[in-house]
Image: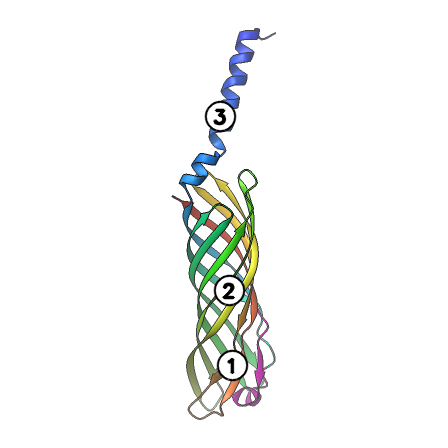
């Protein structure tokens, strides 16, 4: 049987290691700012209104990808985050191909509920969506770049592991309808709303 003093010492060392591994309230306050990399899926719900898209029998984009870089900070239960990203999607239709790449730039306010090292949150904000659409058929191709209003709404959860932040997030992106003007194609309109689901990793400082 292990002597009582040794068991007591072992228990004390284990408790100290656990306490050191978990962020304390003070250390969380000291590390209120963070930089974060996000990556995941973009699930577009794009719909079109006539014009060039009728020529290629466009229906809807398939799921595709999204990456973002974010910088944020928190003030108790409130948080602020600025982010810029890149997303892409394409569709081979009956009469040709439509590709869209976009750079969402957003600022959001967060309501954060810290529970030890776990922090669920909801968020809403505004931003712009800089996007380029490329349409091509057997005969010709054209592209058009536009900037439109965007409003993200979503939520997620962060795990604060000392200076390391791990998380997951879901956002719905409301994007104003975009009107494209082409060379050789009729004017057309596309609505690029969609859902973005990401896994996040960051560093807190």
Q: Quadrant of residue 8?
A: top right
Residue of label 2 = 65
Element under disc 3: helix
Q: Which residue is mark 1?
A: 97
Marks 2 and 3, how far apart at CA? 40 Å
For the residue pair 113 and 22, the one nearer the viewer reads as: 113
Give the quadrant of the C terminus.
Answer: top left
Disc 1 and disc 3 in contact, CB within 8 angstroms: no
Q: CA distance from mark 2 to mark 1?
A: 18 Å
7 or 121: nearer the eye? 121
Question: Residue at the location (40% across, 39% down)?
Answer: 30
* Residue 202 within the magenta-colored segment of the rendering: no
Name the residue carrying label 3. 17
Q: Who's the residue at 48% across and 35% down the image?
A: 25
Between the residue at mark 1 and the residue at mark 3, the CA separation in whole angstroms equals: 57 Å
The residue drawn where x is 59% and y is 73% is 45
The image shows residue 165, relative to residue 59, as above or below, that is above
What residue range appears in magenta?
43-58
Kindly give the residue lying farthest to the left in the view shown.
Answer: 205
Q: Residues within 10 Å of mark 2 (few under 14, many from 20)?
A: some
177 or 123, which lies in front? 123
């Amino acid at each position: 049987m292990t002597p009582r003093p040794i068991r007591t010492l072992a228990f004390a060392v284990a408790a100290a290691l656990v306490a050191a591994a978990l962020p304390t309230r003070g250390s969380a306050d000291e590390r209120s700012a963070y930089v974060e990399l996000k990556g995941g899926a973009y699930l577009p719900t794009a719909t079109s209104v006539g014009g060039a898209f009728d020529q290629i029998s466009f229906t809807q984009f398939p799921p595709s990808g999204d990456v973002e870089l974010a910088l944020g900070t928190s003030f108790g239960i409130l948080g602020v985050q600025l982010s810029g990203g890149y997303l892409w999607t394409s569709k081979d239709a009956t009469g040709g191909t439509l590709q869209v790449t976009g750079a969402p730039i957003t600022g959001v306010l967060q309501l954060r509920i810290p529970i030890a090292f776990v922090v669920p949150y909801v968020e809403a904000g505004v931003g712009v969506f800089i996007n380029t659409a490329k349409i091509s058929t057997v005969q010709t191709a054209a592209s058009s770049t536009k900037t439109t209003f965007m409003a993200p709404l979503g939520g997620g959860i962060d795990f604060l592991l000392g200076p390391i932040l791990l998380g997951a997030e879901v956002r719905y992106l409301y994007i104003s309808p975009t009107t494209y003007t082409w060379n050789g194609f009729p004017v057309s309109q596309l609505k690029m709303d969609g859902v973005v689901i990401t896994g996040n990793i960051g560093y807190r400082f």
